[in-house]
Image (cartoon, rainbow, N blue to C red):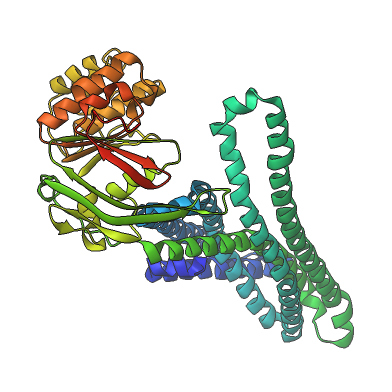
C-alpha cells in the first residue's frame, strides 16, 4: 500500500477534485508565464492583457487553496482512521503476541511511523500543484518550440532514470534506519522508566549512555544521513542538468535554427521557472521514501495483528455480569520463552476449579508462573492445550470477549484510567466517597459525577484507587495480583479482613496472588505453584508453604 492508495481508499472523488483543482492551478501558472513573456517581448499592455493577468492570478489563488484544503482534510481523516484501525487491531490481538512484539515497536508504529506519513501528507497538495505546473510549462514549451520541448523531455527522462538508480539505494538505507529505530525507541523508553537506577549507578549510567544508547543513535543517524545524502546528490544533479539544457537552448540551438531567438526570453523564463517546482519535487522524494517505509512497516504490523486478531463479539451488560457458579480449568497449558533464556517455560498442565463465594490464595516463588496462571484464568492468554469452562459453558474464540467481561482484575503492573471509574454502573458519589474515606484517599481524591479528580498519587495510593475501581465494578470474579505486596500493615489488614470477606459475602469469587502467610487462614483454599506446576491444593490450615 502506498500513500496515494491510502487516499484513494478514503475517497477517490475528493482526490480527483483536488487533482483537478491542482491541474487548473498549474495551467493558470503556465498561462501567467506566457502573459509575462508576451509583455517582456515588448508587447503593448492592453486592458485585455491586464484583465487576463488578474483573472489568472485569482484563478491560481482559488484553485491552489482548494486543492490543498481538499487533500489535507482527506489526508488527516485517513490518518485518523489509520490510527484507530491500528489501535483496534492491537487491542483485538492476543496479549501473548503483543508481549512478543514489545511495547516499543507498537509505540514506534503508532507515533513515529504515523508522523512520517503525516509529514508527507502536508506536502502532497503542493506536490500535485508543482507537477501540474511542470506539465503545463512543458506544453507551453511545445507551443513555443517542439525542438526545445523534446530537449526538455529527454533531459527529464534522463534525470528520472538517474534518480531511479540512486533512490533504490537510498530507500534501503531508510529501511535499515527504521529497523534501528525500534531499538533506539526502546533505549529512549529506558531513560524515563529507569532514571532512578541510572542516577544511582554511575557505571550503569556510563554504559547505557555512551555504549548502548549512543551506538543505537549513531547507527540510526548514519543510515538516515546516507539516504538523505544520496537524495541530495540526485537533486543537485537535476538542477545542474537543467542549467545545461538552458545553455543549449540559448547558445546552441539558435545556431542550428532549432529555436527562434526572438522568443529566447520565453524559453529562459519557462525553464528557469521549472527549476523551483522540480527542486521541490526532488526534495520531497526522501520524505516520500520514508513514508513508503513507514507504510510498509504499518502494513506488516497490521498483517501480523490481523492473523491473530479475534473477532469482537460485543455484548450487553446484562449478558456480561452473569453469575459465576463454577469456573474450571482442565488440562490447561501455556508455553513461552522468557527474555534472555534459551529454554521455554511451560505452565501446566493445570486442573483447577473455582466456585462462587470462595476466597482462593495462589502462592509460590517468583517465576513459578503465578502471573501467567492469572492471565490464563482471566482469558488474556489462550491455553495451548486443555479447556476452560464457565458454568459448564466451554470458552472458545467466539465467546472469549464474553468470558473476559466476568473478571475485575488489579494486576501488579496495573494501569489506572482517569475516567474509567464505575464504567457502566450507577453508584452514587456518596457511596464512592465512603470507600475513599476507608482507604484514606478522601483528602487527595474527590469524586464528581463518577469522575475522579486526580490519579496523581503515590504508587501505594494509586493501587488503593485501582482496588476501589475494581471493587465497584461488581463483576462475578475478582482477581488481585499481589495487591498487598507494597501496602502498609493497615491497608493489608483492610484488604484481607474487610475487602475479601465482603466480596465473599456478596457471592463473588475472589482469587488473590499473595505472599502474606499471616492471612492464609482467611482463605477457603490455597493453591501452590512451583515452576509451572501445581504442587499443592489445600485448605488454609495446611502447612504447604
Question: Which quadrant: the C terminus?
Answer: top left
Is residue 328 visible to the viewer in this orientation of the structure? yes
Q: Residue at x 18, y 31 (%)?
A: 472
Q: Residue at x 16, y 36 (%)?
A: 358
Picture quarter containing residue 204? Answer: top right
Residue 83 at what x, y percent from top left? 41, 53
Residue 528 at what x, y percent from top left? 33, 39
Out of 388 and 282, give the one closest to the viewer.
Answer: 388
Out of 290 and 431, give the one closest to the viewer.
Answer: 431
Picture quarter containing residue 37? Answer: bottom right
Question: In this picture, is 310 found above or below 204?
Answer: below
Question: In this picture, is 394 found above or below 500?
Answer: below
Judge from the rendering whether residue 41 lies leftward or rightward of residue 379; answer left or right.
right
Residue 153 at what x, y percent from top left? 71, 80
Out of 39 and 407, give the one closest to the viewer.
Answer: 407
Is residue 278 visible to the viewer in this orientation of the structure? no
Picture quarter containing residue 148? Answer: bottom right
- Figure label count: 0
Judge from the rendering whether residue 237 lies leftward or rightward of residue 201; answer left or right.
right
Judge from the rendering whether residue 163 lies leftward or rightward of residue 497; answer left or right.
right
Residue 200 at what x, y percent from top left? 64, 22
Q: Residue furthest front?
A: 543
Q: Residue at x 72, y 51 (%)?
A: 219
Amino acid at each position: 500500500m502506498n500513500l496515494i492508495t491510502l487516499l484513494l481508499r478514503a475517497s477517490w472523488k475528493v482526490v480527483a477534485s483536488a487533482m483537478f483543482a491542482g491541474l487548473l492551478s498549474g495551467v493558470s501558472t503556465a498561462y501567467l508565464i506566457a502573459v509575462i513573456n508576451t509583455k517582456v517581448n515588448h508587447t503593448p499592455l492592453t486592458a485585455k492583457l491586464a484583465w487576463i493577468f488578474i483573472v489568472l492570478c485569482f484563478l491560481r489563488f482559488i484553485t491552489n487553496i482548494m486543492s490543498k484544503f481538499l487533500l489535507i482534510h482527506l489526508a488527516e481523516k485517513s490518518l485518523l482512521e489509520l490510527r484507530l484501525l491500528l489501535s483496534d487491531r492491537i487491542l483485538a490481538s492476543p496479549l501473548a503476541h503483543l508481549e512478543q512484539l514489545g511495547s516499543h515497536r507498537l509505540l514506534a508504529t503508532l507515533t513515529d511511523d504515523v508522523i512520517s506519513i503525516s509529514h508527507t501528507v502536508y506536502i502532497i497538495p503542493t506536490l500535485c500543484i508543482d507537477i501540474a505546473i511542470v506539465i503545463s510549462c512543458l506544453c507551453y514549451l511545445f507551443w513555443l518550440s517542439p525542438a526545445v520541448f523534446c530537449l526538455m523531455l529527454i533531459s527529464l527522462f534522463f534525470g528520472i532514470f538517474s534518480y531511479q538508480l540512486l533512490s533504490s539505494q537510498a530507500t534501503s538505507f531508510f529501511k535499515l534506519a527504521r529497523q534501528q529505530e525500534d531499538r533506539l525507541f526502546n533505549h529512549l523508553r529506558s531513560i524515563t522508566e529507569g532514571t532512578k537506577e541510572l542516577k544511582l549507578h554511575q557505571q550503569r549510567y556510563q554504559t547505557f549512555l555512551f555504549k548502548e544508547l549512543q551506538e543505537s543513535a549513531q547507527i540510526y543517524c548514519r543510515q538516515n544521513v546516507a539516504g538523505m545524502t544520496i537524495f541530495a546528490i540526485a537533486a543537485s544533479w537535476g538542477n545542474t542538468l537543467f542549467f545545461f539544457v538552458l545553455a543549449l537552448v540559448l547558445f546552441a540551438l539558435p545556431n542550428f535554427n532549432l529555436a527562434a531567438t526572438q522568443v529566447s526570453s520565453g524559453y529562459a523564463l519557462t525553464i528557469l521557472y521549472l527549476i523551483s517546482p522540480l527542486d521541490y519535487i526532488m526534495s520531497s522524494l526522501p520524505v516520500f521514501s520514508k513514508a513508503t517505509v513507514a507504510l510498509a512497516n504499518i502494513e506488516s504490523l497490521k498483517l501480523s495483528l490481523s492473523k491473530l486478531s479475534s473477532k469482537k463479539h460485543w455484548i450487553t451488560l446484562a449478558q456480561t455480569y452473569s453469575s459465576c457458579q463454577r469456573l474450571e480449568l482442565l488440562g490447561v497449558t501455556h508455553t513461552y520463552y522468557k527474555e534472555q533464556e534459551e529454554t521455554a517455560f511451560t505452565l501446566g498442565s493445570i486442573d483447577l476449579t473455582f466456585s462462587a463465594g470462595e476466597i482462593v490464595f495462589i502462592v509460590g516463588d517468583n517465576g513459578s508462573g503465578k502471573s501467567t496462571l492469572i492471565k490464563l484464568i482471566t482469558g488474556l492468554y489462550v491455553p495451548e492445550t486443555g479447556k476452560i469452562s464457565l458454568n459448564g459453558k466451554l470458552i472458545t474464540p467466539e465467546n472469549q470477549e464474553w468470558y473476559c467481561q466476568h473478571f475485575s482484575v488489579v494486576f501488579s503492573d496495573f494501569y489506572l484510567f482517569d475516567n474509567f471509574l464505575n464504567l457502566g454502573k450507577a453508584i452514587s458519589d456518596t457511596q464512592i466517597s465512603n470507600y475513599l474515606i476507608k482507604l484514606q484517599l478522601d483528602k487527595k481524591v474527590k469524586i464528581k459525577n463518577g469522575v475522579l479528580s486526580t490519579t496523581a498519587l503515590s504508587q501505594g495510593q494509586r493501587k488503593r484507587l485501582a482496588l476501589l475501581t475494581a471493587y465497584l465494578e461488581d463483576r462475578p470474579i475478582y482477581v488481585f495480583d499481589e495487591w498487598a505486596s507494597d501496602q502498609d500493615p493497615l491497608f493489608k489488614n483492610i484488604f484481607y479482613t474487610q475487602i475479601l470477606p465482603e466480596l465473599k459475602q456478596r457471592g463473588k469469587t475472589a482469587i488473590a496472588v499473595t505472599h502474606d502467610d499471616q492471612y492464609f487462614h482467611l482463605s477457603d483454599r490455597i493453591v501452590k505453584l512451583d515452576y509451572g506446576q501445581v504442587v499443592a491444593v489445600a485448605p488454609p490450615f495446611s502447612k504447604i508453604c
